Image: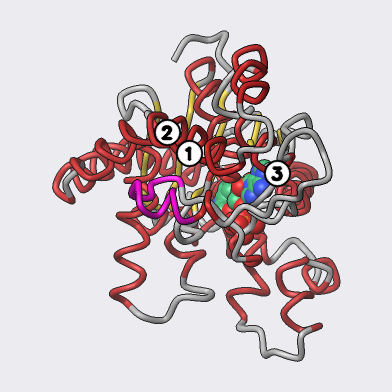
Amino acid sequence: MTDAKKRIFTGLQSSGQLHIGNYFGALKPFLDSYQNFDSFLMVADYHALTSLKDPVAVRESIYNVVRDYLAIGVDPSKAVIFQQSRVSEHTELAWILECLVSVSMLELGHAYKDKVAKGLEANAGLFNYPMLMAADIILYDTDIVPVGADQRQHVEYAREAAAKFNIAYGKTFVEPKELIADSVAIVPGTDGKKMSKSYGNTIPLFGTREEISKAVMSIVTDSSGERPEHVYAIHKLFRAEEELAPIYEANKGKYKALKEALIEDIDAFVAPMRERRAAITDEEIKHIIAEGSEKAKAIASAKMADVRGKVGVTLL
Ligand code: ADP
Ligand code: TRP
């Protein structure tokens, strides 16, 4: 780490099979910038326990999320990739922060509120989720937290928790800022609406050629305009518009041919990632996580020694 580099920290929770919307909206902006920072990527396995109860699924999600990041090209020697549960200081600091913030603040937390609004019972872990996330972030004196818009409140809560601690016990934590890529366009799905796993309109990022073909062939086209807009909107993510112009000109009205051209371009783009993903072994992932967790632990334990002293539990 050079002194000039700011520290970024983000947490990864497996969100199932990634689609090209996730890639252009979340993964690519991270990939393009992480080397300019002192970067930490944490697998939020304890956060995952708020919803996953099957140990096999938990274990699989840990491997999967690391595999996804390595497959898109994150270089593990340029970012500290680690596992939350291996650094016990996270849950320890979360407790201390919980003793500083009010129940009414946590009651306004989106994840908890949404669950309750649906008439579902929320577990206490979900209620406390934002303070575990605050601990994740502030233990490392994080400057910037790149996240999706849905995580904005959580980063605000982390900032608030850091400020509360600093006021109560003296300046200890950096107050982190969220980095939300508003400029990233929303990638449309096969029906023209926002691509989202909950709408079933996705093109899988690591899909086989057959899966990509099936998704592209299902893109809704309408014959009113000059070109099939839903096809074009996705195509321009993969090829410059100047290059697309002659292809779309030559194939006016030939939707099948245009879809085939799109399949070619997506497949050419995805193939190296798909191959890389398939080649990454569990052993490699374990090794990367073990190394990263050791680095994280060294930072976190020094910070917690300071925190324990400040709150008064260290005997003098
Ligand atoms: P989904 O909508 O499929 O459930 P998630 O909510 O898990 O996706 O999103 C994970 C990340 O990917 C978020 O940072 C989100 O902003 C980004 N993302 C998801 N869908 C799109 C999209 N269609 N266009 C751009 N970014 C997206
Ligand atoms: N809550 C985040 C999500 O669902 C994951 C997460 C956990 C996280 N700890 C974090 C993100 C710390 C950024 C920083 O995506």
Q: Which mark is residue 230?
A: 3
Q: CA distance from mark 2 to mark 1?
A: 6 Å
Residue 167 in the image: x percent, y percent? 80, 44
Q: Nearer the viewer, residue 253 or 217?
A: 253
Q: Residue 9 sits in which quadrant? A: top right
Q: Is residue 275 magenta?
A: no
User: Where 292 sits versus 126, above or below?
Assistant: above
| Circle 1: residue type | Glu
- Residue 38: mark: none
Q: In the drawing, what numbered circle is on residue 264?
A: 2
Ligand 1 near label 1 (Cβ, under 8 Å)? no
Above or below residue 139? Residue 313 is below
Question: Pointer 2: residues within 10 angstroms few (<14), some, or many (20+)?
Answer: some
* Residue depicted at x 34% and y 26%: 75
- Image coords of residue 234 (percent x, y): 63, 37
Residue drawn at the location 32% of the way across and 43% of the way down: 293
The answer to whether the residues at label 2 and label 1 have Cβ atoms under 8 Å apart is: yes
**What span is colored magenta in the figure?**
205-214
Sooner in the amino-acid sequence: mark 2 or mark 3: 3
Numbered disc 2: secondary structure: helix
Q: Which residue is mark 1?
A: 260
| Quadrant assignment, res 64 | bottom left
Identify the residue at horizontal 56%, vertical 55% (top origin).
202
Other residues around mark 1 within 10 Å, as few (<14) / some (14–19) / many (≥20): some
